Image (tube, rainbow, N blue to C red):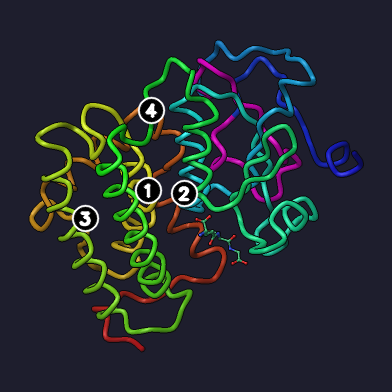
Amino acid sequence: MKYESTRSFIYQQQQPPPPPYLLSDQSQIKTIQYFQHSSHFSHSTPTTMSAEASSAVRVIGLWPSPFVIRVLIALKLKGVEYEFVEEQVGKKSELLLRSNPVHKKIPVLLHHGKPISESLVIVQYVDEAWSSSAAPAILPADPYTRAVHRFWAQYIDDKFPPAIRTLKGSDDGDKEQAAGQLSAALQLLEAAFVELSQGKSYFGGDGVGYLDIALVSHVGWVRAVEKIAGVALLDEAKVPNLAAWAGRLCAHAAVADAIPDADKFVEFSVKYGSFSKPINSGAK
Ligand SMILES: N[C@@H](CCC(=O)N[C@@H](CS)C(=O)NCC(=O)O)C(=O)O
């Protein structure tokens, strides 16, 4: 296909490919191959692969998108190799428009060329499509618990993105109010964590589950807007269990590569024009 032949580039050097967030926007490298059973920081990265393997699973995305981050975590948890097809900021590719003609948004997962959109749908799809993988299920087995996890994931997507957009200045809106809404949501999630984790490490218990993925995907931006807007949100004093959970999960092997430091998100925000003054600065 013309698009793939001109824009795809399979990383075949001895050096491990960088994580997606280290790619420069001007980079000629538009797609990166990730490998099963090897971290992309690992030097065990194979240097050859079949053409079939190179196109079986592709993710269209951009590293700072929390919705994209979810998909990368789910694939990593399942040990699925994939190709990252990097979109350009502010310019939607023909592949994206063709693959998600309804919403025209990232992420899109292409599985043997068939597109799946909406991050939470994709995470569920990955869980089902690779259910025979040695990795544990992402969604809880019990239908009631599964419904509860889906409820909170929906809640997170209703509350977090609009408040984060306001706090980083990409949307107009009252920053104090947005910080208050995000704090209130985090308080509710703190209580939900205590109930659902039952003293274990994650919402999913001993292993990283659906709700863990849904929430941790926003942590990079939450930490970034804490810096940008000068507010404390994921704060040990306010939400001790969630703060500890976030630290634990961001260090997890399936998550660490997908979520860079808050400063990277701040840099992205500055570069693409949504940087705003701290809400306490007194400036308008
Ligand atoms: N509900 C969608 C949200 C996806 C979304 O908002 N993606 C953003 C990037 S973070 C996007 O593609 N925005 C482009 C646009 O709105 O046109 C999901 O969960 O996948």
Badge 2 vs badge 1, beta-carbon distance below 8 Å: yes
Per the image, label 4 sits on a secondary structure element best described as loop
Whether the residue carrying mark 3 lies under 8 Å from ligand 1 is answered with: no
Residue 102 or 37: which is nearer the viewer? 102
Q: Which mark is residue 120?
A: 2
- Label 4 vs label 3, nearer the camera: 4
Q: Give residue 242's position: percent from left, percent from top.
A: 18, 47
Q: Main secondary structure of the magenta part?
A: loop
Q: Amino acid at mark 1?
A: Ala
Q: Give residue 186's position: percent from left, percent from top.
A: 21, 59
Whether the residue carrying mark 2 lies under 8 Å from ligand 1 is answered with: yes
Quadrant of the rendered image containing residue 180:
bottom left
Give the residue number, with chain letter if any, for mark 3. 234
Q: Which residues are magenta?
A: 18-40
Q: Earlier in the sequence, mark 1 or mark 3?
A: 1
Per the image, label 1 sits on a secondary structure element best described as helix
Q: Residue at x 48, y 57 (%)?
A: 267
How far is disc 1 from disc 3 in space, using C-alphas? 16 Å
Q: Which mark is residue 82?
A: none
State which image quarter holds ligand 1. Answer: bottom right
- Label 2 vs label 1, nearer the camera: 2
Placement of 193 over or under 103, stated as above or below: above
Q: Earlier in the sequence, mark 3 or mark 2?
A: 2
Quadrant of the rendered image containing residue 112:
top right
Give the residue number, with chain letter if any, for mark 1. 214
How far is disc 4 from disc 3 in space, using C-alphas? 27 Å
Quick one: label 3, few (<14), some, or many (20+) residues within 10 Å? many
Give the residue number, with chain letter if any, for mark 4. 137
Q: Amino acid at mark 3?
A: Leu
Q: Give residue 129's position: percent from left, percent from top.
A: 55, 29
Quick one: label 1, few (<14), some, or many (20+) residues within 10 Å? many
